[in-house]
Structures are given as structure tokens and as C-alpha cells.
Image (cartoon, rainbow, N blue to C red):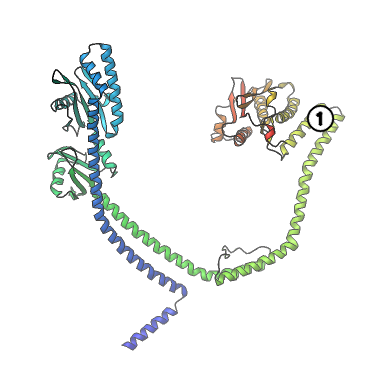
Amino acid sequence: MEIFTMKTKKTMMTRIANLQLGTKIVGILLIVILLMISSSIAGITMVLHSSNKLLYQALAGSLTYSAEDISRKISNIESMTSAIVSNSNIRKNLITLNDDESMIRTGNAKSSLETLLADYYQTYKNNNISYINLYYPGGVVQSYEAQSSSVPEQVHREVIAAANNVSGYPCAVTDYCNSYGLFLGRDSRRVEQMNFHRLGTVVVCVDMNRLIRSSTSSVLPSEETQYVLMDNGTEFYHSDGIGSEQLKDIHRRLRSDYGVVTVDSNRYFAVQGTIKNTSWEYICLVPYDHIFAALSFTMVLALAIILISVLIAILLSRMLIRSVTEDFRRLVNKMKAFGKDESKAPDIGYDYSGRIDEIGVLHNQFDQMTIKIQDLIQQNYVNEILSKDARLKALENQINPHFLYNTLEAVNWRAKAIGEKNISSMVESLGTLLRETLSSGSKNFTLSHELEIVQCYLTIQRIRFEDRLTYSQNVDPAILSVTLPHFTIQPLVENSVNYAMEKSTEVCHIWLEGSRHKDTIVIDVINNGSQFENDLLEKLENGLITPHGFGIGLLNIHKRIQLTYGTGYGLTLFNKDEEHAVARIIIPGGTYAESIDRR
């Protein structure tokens, strides 16, 4: 038997030894994964068992806190009624309403009471107060008339009658909690001829549904939380989702301060106790089915995560095993590719520069060899060709602008020679505009320089349109040295010429005005014969209008000014009247040429 066992063991070990390396690694990983799954499931089961017990205690404590919050708010409201009846201004105004017959003084007293009640309502409305009424023998003052008018006046009279019977102490009326709310009443009295005389009665209505929701949502934000309030065993308030028969069943089944009860095939976690500073008893119910579903979902999610982790581990292990044999295949392919084309390094889609294993060393040594070979080729052949090509490109870039400038100079000379002054002026202006356009110097130029560019442009346009185009300029000489982004004004003048001449056959007048306004400089380009669309820049910037032609230039000018000086400056487009359109540039008044590199 022992020989058979040894032989079987040896056969098994031989088979294992003959397995491929990938199969061995996968087998080891599967054993480790199975052990991890077993331990994880056992740990999750133990944690859930312990968490159920802790959950019961935590829920009970949280629901008990909600009862303490209800008690606190009721106490706050009682303190508020005490503050109202003892407030000297309120008492003085009540005495005026009781004793004074002057309509002016009683009217002032009532207005003052309305203001004071509104202040108390705003201060204490977080305690879920619906409204505050102050009744006096001749009438009533209301903090929230719309809410108060929805409650029958008979209810208020019952609260007043109950408050009259407790000699100035707070009185709670719970008969209408399910319909109108909880009512608290309190008398304000004064001593008169050795007797207490009632000045008025404070009636406070508390929205019970809001009170319960706000108190329970602070610890358990669930709209399905149910609440029951009882006074000496008699129920006076219950949530909408609970019926009378259910209340009896819950009260009978709940044998301790908290526990799980089943009502109409639904399970609830219930807590019962007494609200402090009152004789009220409460029962709070939370649907336990949702809690159990959440715990079950957590368990399923944990198992799903474990299974996904197992699948990922298996996939990663397969990738790792395959990479061992893949490395050799890549090295062979790299050698073949380099043998076919030595001018570039083979790209196999994998970087071995960070590998320090044996395969990585082979790949890195081969890569270094290819780099050295390519360096030799680069030095002896490619670099020389690229150098010649670069020199040719540089010569071409020098020839093209100079050729164009020389051609314009030749045309200008020829025009002067034959007495064509208009052609000469146009060529000179065009040459100036061309040099400005191709200039690679400073990005900011003086206003004086920009106006020279405008004059060059208008020289061409006035020869073209003759008497149909006029131009006038009124710029404060003190601002001519101010700087602004290059080519800021000329595109606006060009825009005026194009749109005015396009939409009108009349004479186009263009005015350019510039002046200082406090800490800013304003430059206006005004033309007749065209109008700007309302909010044109905003529409271009927000994509409501597709920019094209001069629309792109307008938006470009606006953004360049803002990038240079900040968002408080820029371009503004508006219509002065039905005949004149204005493009206004606003820049800061301190941007002078002394502080900026000039051309």
C-alpha cells in the first residue's frame, strides 16, 4: 500500500513537473484565489451578523434623537410664547388696544404688534411654526394671515378658552393635530385692582407633518418614516401611511423599547418612548424591508467584486505568461524590420527601456546597436541633405518679401515718372500696409502710428470710391502716444467702408474721435449708412451667430484688447441712431509708449 502511494505521488509530481510554465503559474494563482474567496465570504458573513446588531442599536438611538428634537422644538415654541407675553412693547401696545379709544393710537399699536409678531415668526419659524396670532378683546393680530384664515375660527376660540383656564401657563391643544396642526395658547395678563386682567392670548399653530419630517430627516432622511403620538394612551397624531388597526397591531406586537414588527406582511423597525417635558408617548417606524434589501445588495455587490477580481486576476496571469514568449517573437520581428530598412528604428509597439530582466537586456542591447548605426547614417548622409534644404528654405523666405517690395517700388517709380499721382499714392499706401501686416516686431503700437495706417488705407479707398467716401478725424493730441494692440483701428474703418458702401448708394461719412474719460481712453469709429445687430459681439462669442468675414475681425479685436488690458476693457458695438453705427474701443488711460517697446 505504501509502495502504491509513493508511486502515485511520484507519477503526480512528474505530471506537474511536465506542465507548461503558464499552466503552473495559473494553477498557483487559482489556489490562492480560492483561498481568498473562502476567507472573504466567511469574513463578510461575520461582519453582517455583527452589523445587524449594531444597526438595531444605531437606529434606535437615531430615532430616539428625533423624539428629543421634537421635544426641543416644542420647548422653543413655549419659550417663544413666554417671550411674547412678557415683551414690554407688546404689553404696552395691548394695554393701548384695551384702554385707549383713539383710533390713531390703537391703529399705531396694532401696526407695531404686527411688526413684532412678524419678527418672532421669522426668528422661530425653523421650529415648524405655521403662524402666530395674538388675540385681544377687540380683534386679532396675525403673523401669517393666509395660513391663519385656512383654519376655522372655532378652533382658535377653543384654544383661547383652554388658555384662559391655565392662568398664564402654556396650554397645548392636540385635538386637531391630524387636520390643522398642534396649537399652543398662552394668556398675557396684568394686575388690575388686585385681580389678574387678561390683555390678550397668543395662539401658535405648529405644522405637525413638517415637524415630524424635519425631526426624522435629520437622522434618517426617508419619506417613509412613520410617526405616532399618544397622550395617556390615546392617539392624537399619526403619519398618513398608518391606520387605526395598524396602530393597535403595532402596540400589541412591540414588547420592548425597539424591535422588528410585521404589519400587513411588511416589516418595520419600531422604537417607542416618551417625549421629554410632555406626557406624550411616541412610536416611530422605519421600513425594515428597505434596510434588509440594502444589506443584501451590499452582500451581492461584495461577491460580485470578488468574482470580478478573480476574472481580472486570471486575465492578467494569462497576459503575463503570454508576454514571456511574446518578447522573443518581438525581438525576431525587430531584427527583420531593421534588416529591411536601416534608416528608422523598428516600432514593435512595446518599450523595453525600463526592463532589467534577461529579455529586456537583449532588446536594449539591440536598440543601442540600431541607434549607433542610425547615427552614422545621419552624420554622413541625412544631416547634410537637411542642412542644404534648410539653407534653400531660408533663401526663399528672404527672396519672396523683398521681391514683392521691390516690385511695388518699381510700380511707384513708374507711376511718378508718367505723372500718375493717384497710382503712386495707392502703391505707397499698399506698400506701407503690406510692411505693417508682415511686421514681426512689437505687438503694441502708439495711437499715432495706428492712425497713420488708417490714413494709408483710406488713401486707397478714397481713390477707389472718389466722392462717395469722406473721412474726418478729431483726436485729442494728448492721447496720441497711448499704446494699443497693432491693427486695432484700421479693421474697424475697413468694416465701416465695406458695410456702408454695400448697403447704401449715398455718400459714406466716417468720423474717428478719440478722447480721455477719467481713467479710460475712448476711441469711436462712426459711420452712416449701416447698423449693427443687437448684442452682436455676445452672439459671436457664444456661437449664436457663425462668424465670417469682418465678424471674425471684430471678435478678434475685442479679445486682443481684453487679453492685453483685462476684461474691463474691449470693443463695444452700438447704434447711435437710425443712421449711424458706432464701434467704440475702450482702453486704460495709463498705457503710454514709454513703458512698452515701440516699433
Of 531 and 72, nearer the camera is: 72
Q: Is residue 528 above or below residue 346?
A: above
Q: Residue at x 34, y 87 (%)?
A: 4
Outermost residue toward the right?
A: 417
Using a 10 Å C-alpha cutoff, classify the residue at mark 1 as few (fewer than 14 neighbours), some (14 to 19) or many (20 or more): many
Residue 147 seen: yes
Q: Position of residue 42 (x, y in %)?
A: 30, 64
Tell me the quadrant of the picture where the N terminus can be found. Answer: bottom left
- The image quadrant of residue 40 is bottom left
Q: Amino acid at mark 1?
A: Ser
Secondary structure category for the residue under label 1: helix
Residue 341 seen: no
Tell me the quadrant of the picture where the C terminus can be found. Answer: top right
Q: Position of residue 197 (x, y in %)?
A: 16, 20
Q: Is residue 283 above or below residue 175?
A: below
- The image quadrant of residue 412 is top right
Left or right of 171, for residue 45:
right
Q: Is residue 26 above or below residue 207?
A: below
Q: Residue at x 76, y 49 (%)?
A: 394
Left or right of 589, for residue 59:
left
- The image quadrant of residue 215 is top left
Q: Residue at x 68, y 36 (%)?
A: 596
Left or right of 143, for residue 16:
right
Q: Position of residue 123 (x, y in %)?
A: 30, 30
Outermost residue toward the top?
A: 102
Of 415 and 308, nearer the camera is: 308
Left or right of 575, for residue 463:
right
Q: Residue at x 38, y 67 (%)?
A: 33
* Residue underneath mark 1: 424
